[in-house]
Amino acid sequence: MRKNLLHASLINAHEISIVYISTYSSVDNVDFYLIKENQRLSLRKEINHRTSIPEVKLICREEIELGFDYRVMSSEDESVYLDYDNYVLTPEFDEYYAYEGDDLGVTYSPSSSLFKVWSPLSDKVYLKLEKKEQENSFLLYEMNREEHGVFSLRLKGDLFNKKYAYMVRVNGREHQILDPYAKGTSLNSEYSVVLDLDIVKSMGKVEPPTKTENYNEAIIYELSIRDFTETADVEHPGTYTGLIEKIDYLKKLGITHVQLLPVLDFATGDDLLKDVYNWGYDPVGFFCLEGSYSSFPEDPISRLIEFKNLVNELHKNDIKVILDVVYNHLYDYINTGFQANVPFYYFRRYKNKVCNASGCGNDFASEKKMARKIIIDSIKYLIETFDIDGFRFDLLGLIDVDTTNEAFAAAKEIKPNIMFYGEGWHMGTNLPEDKKSSMVNADKLPGIAFFNDSFRDLIKGSTFNHEEKGYVSGNLEYKTPVEHVLLGSVINNKFQDTCQSINYVECHDNQTIYDKLACIYDDKNEILKRVKFANSLLIFALGVPFIHMGQEIGLSKCGLDNTYNVKGINNMDWKLVEERKDMINLLVDLIKIRKKFSSLFTLRKAGDILKAFDMFQLPSGVLSIAVRDPKYLDISKKAVIIVNPTDKLQQIEFDDYLTLYLSGAGIPNKEYIVKNFISAAGSVNIFLLK
């Protein structure tokens, strides 16, 4: 027999909406009750008959407090579980149940461990804990419900390295979940693991010799641990430890920050087997480190120790560490400890469907209090435990402005010189336009920087039209907007501060610049010359220079765009490092010059920049940039930068005799004083009046 009572949804702490459809009886003649455990509560009925299907609202005089088993029953002996999917979206839910404590997860000591999980919809939660004396055999312990829907349990004894999970019961259904706040995980994220974080903290912190006072002093180098070390001559390829063995190369370049592609636990791949490849933009959670990068992945604490050692070694070599973090979505959200625990709370919805602007099946609802809290808590944990220096946010435009600003403020309290930047693309998620952490809202996000796609596409040409020429391949239609991006994108008011502009011509996504130029030029030597030209413009532009691994040697991905799961194609080519030393040496010289004249290249505001620089577009297509204020030049009275984007040699005549400070090959090994100069096609040259 078909049921009439189909659904019951909690609207607020006193109201329930039901779906009742019957062809033979009227809802007017049916009474409804709320069953709380074994207690029956009366409900007052309100019916709106003006709709095709009567809208029925049930009013409960007693407050409906979560944490109990609730069913709505009719006088026809039908019942359904009370659904909370819409209630969790209300401000009331956040007001009543958001938890502000800093003790979620496991608080470990050798004598006892305290387990806490936020699970406000559950009427029962059990801790599933590995037996002390027997691996992979578990016992269940009922946890105690406390205020705000937190369940807790303290167990005596030393539980270090023990696996655990939570069994939560929501709407009569039981689910096993990982601890969203776990710091340790077993192989391939099967279980959470109890760890002693004091082991990691006892390793201490190493203060890099050089402080970064503002973002413009940073020179960022992006790499994947696996891609950078897998084919290198190291003892531990593809691991945290393997990267330590290649720090000398990074130090030689002169970069100040290394940005690591995701190192937080991701789903695709295997901690033991290396036959599956992925960059890691498929997060399991926000705290645990990835096991496949560990030399001993079967030992949960090892990955933390190895990673902390890597950070310390980088700091010893004056290289700061930025983590690429993915807080905008979760992999397979339905089976995460988020969705099974508090259904539909953590994931943004529109018209009862989960938003998918991320393209990964879900958008994380950062605007919800406990979603915001776990993002901020993750960032604080990573700084406090591993001494991280900055964060690059994947699809930052999916995170709300308030969360981004609050996270930044919390991070600065721990580390005042922290860096925050991300992909500020406009994303079609269910957030008000002025609440998205996108580039168009840069004025609402002071201190936050964004990848400058205008710089990228003007310099190298359209990312998505491979044959379109950019400025480095002679497209002079871009000569005026190129002036703006070279001056930090503040003259045209894209940003208020050049520190907000992450300048780049390639990153892990899309084609490398070599592959882009290979769609325009046939000659390899010409391609490599134009790569060097692009690198020169990048380093000398105001803003924050961002270099992708291998960009310095013209690395190719065989023309491919989306290579997040293509094994081998992204690897650093260490043979090319030996073959193309001239390209590396040029980059080293460019960075030396940027650091030497740091007061010039770290100018931030439009007014100061306009006073410092004079730009002239010569009829030949050459761009002349004059720096006339000697206070920025240290050793000279004037500097002239000659930029030749054309495909021809160009003769340049100066008013004074100038000293050549940088040629297309780098810093000259002897002094050349000239008044006339032939500028090579696709080159940047610097001259000084001493």
Image (cartoon, grey):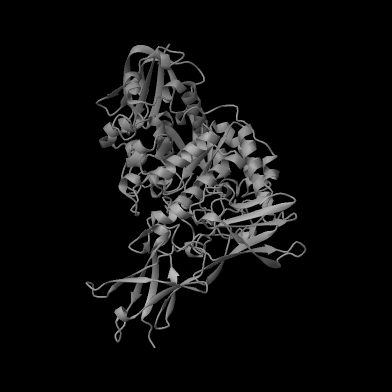
Name which quarter of the figure residue 234 lies in.
Answer: top right
Q: How many marks?
A: 0
Q: Residue at x 42, y 14 (%)?
A: 631
Q: Position of residue 649 (x, y in %)?
A: 34, 28
Residue 276 point in image, percent of width and height:
56, 60
- Quick one: 115 or 286, which is closer to the camera? 115
Is 266 or 78 nearer to us in this picture? Answer: 78
Q: Is residue 292 above or below residue 537?
A: below
Furthest-left residue in this view: 50
Is residue 421 among the parts visible in the rendering?
Answer: no
Q: On the rendered structure, is 4 left or right of 234?
A: left
Q: Residue at x 49, y 24 (%)?
A: 595
If the image is split into quadrants, where does the N terminus sit? Answer: bottom left
Residue 637 placement (x, y as % from top left): 40, 12
Q: Quadrant of the C terminus?
A: top left
Q: Name the spot of residue 480 as percent of width and height, x first.
A: 27, 31
Q: Which residue is at the far bottom? A: 1
**74 and 289: which one is in front?**
74
Q: For this view, does 661 lie left or right of residue 678?
A: right
Residue 38 seen from this side: yes
Name the residue furthest right.
Answer: 133
Q: Can you say whether 404 is above or below 82 in the image?
A: above
In this orientation, which residue lies closer to the viewer: 45 or 504? 45
